[in-house]
Amino acid sequence: MKIVKHSGSIVDFNRDKLKSSLLKSGADKKVVEDVLQVIEKQVYDGISTKKIYKLAFNLLKKSSHSHAARYNLRAALQLLGPAGFFFEKYIARLFISEGYLAQTNLFLSGKCVGHEVDVAIMKNNYIEMVECKFHAKSETNSDVKVPMYILSRFNDLKDRNHLIFTERDTISGCWIVTNNRFTADAMAFAHCSGLQLLSWDYPKEFSLQKRIDEGQLYPITCLTTLTLAEKDKLLVQDVILASEIINNTEVLEQIGLSANRVKNVIKEASELCKYL
């Protein structure tokens, strides 16, 4: 049976691939098998992967909100937009969880011109800049022009004194982070140029997806018990991670949730953050 991907390309329906993604949600084997059986009865030749995803998500949600939230992770990252400002804050949180200090939304003077820097991080007195390439659509990848452009900015900023964490900080390294993927040329150029890349599935053992799971850094946009409008209100209040509401019911009350809904949201967030 043929299915249509986001990009428009046509591929064979792969039961094992779908099963693997469902198991990653934390659902047990029986639930996953039940979901697969329902989906297999409803798929048809030419169905889109988007429809399959939506069907799987809704079936998981009936079983467990937190499993559906985990399954929804990549789509949840795409809600940290529209321009990616919240994605930058999210990436700062990720590095902080790994022992870095982080600053966001900086304007630094280079040798030639000034530059906006999404995130600056420091560990062991080693400072790096982090440029975030946010994409609201899953089929959009970052091509070789991205690291080429960012390398020129890094070269203009490095070896100069900046006011970041102290008054005389120098930037010695550069990361590029995307919620989607890099093209092969982009990865080759970055590797050759000494730039660090982080994407949804790269590097394989330390990808964005794996770091999120290991650190339980699930964005607030994962939660299925909140509406889109409520998620936006929380983001504006600098509530970026699901874990940040577990012991902070007041922020949920402030955006108008009833006591019963607060209880349900906290339950989902708690279960999600205990995924591992």
Image (cartoon, rainbow, N blue to C red):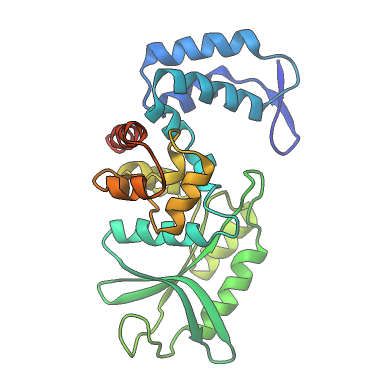
Examine the rendered structure and indicate whether residue 55 appears above or below residue 173.
above
Q: What is the tally of numbered marks visible in this picture? A: 0
Where residue 126 sits: x, y (%)?
32, 75
Where residue 269 sits: x, y (%)?
33, 37
Where residue 208 sits: x, y (%)?
44, 49
Q: In this view, does 245 lie to the left or right of 19?
A: left
Examine the rendered structure and indicate whether residue 108 appears above or below residue 185.
below
- Looking at the rendering, which quadrant does residue 192 occupy? bottom right
- Tell me, yes or no, if residue 105 can be seen here: yes
Q: Is residue 133 left or right of residue 97?
A: right
Q: Nearer the viewer, residue 217 or 11?
A: 217
Examine the rendered structure and indicate whether residue 153 appears above or below residue 176.
below
Q: Which of 130 and 232 is in front in this view?
A: 232
Examine the rendered structure and indicate whether residue 164 appears above or below residue 97.
below
Residue pictured at 31% horizontal, 37% vertical: 266
Residue pictured at 58% horizontal, 27% vertical: 53
Residue pictured at 46% horizontal, 21% vertical: 60
- Looking at the rendering, which quadrant does residue 243 occupy? top left
Where residue 131 sits: x, y (%)?
51, 67
- Tell me, yes or no, if residue 201 can be seen here: no
Q: Quadrant of the N terminus?
A: top right
Q: In this view, does 5 lie to the left or right of 97?
A: right
Q: In which quarter of the image is the C terminus?
A: top left
- Looking at the rendering, which quadrant does residue 225 occupy? top left
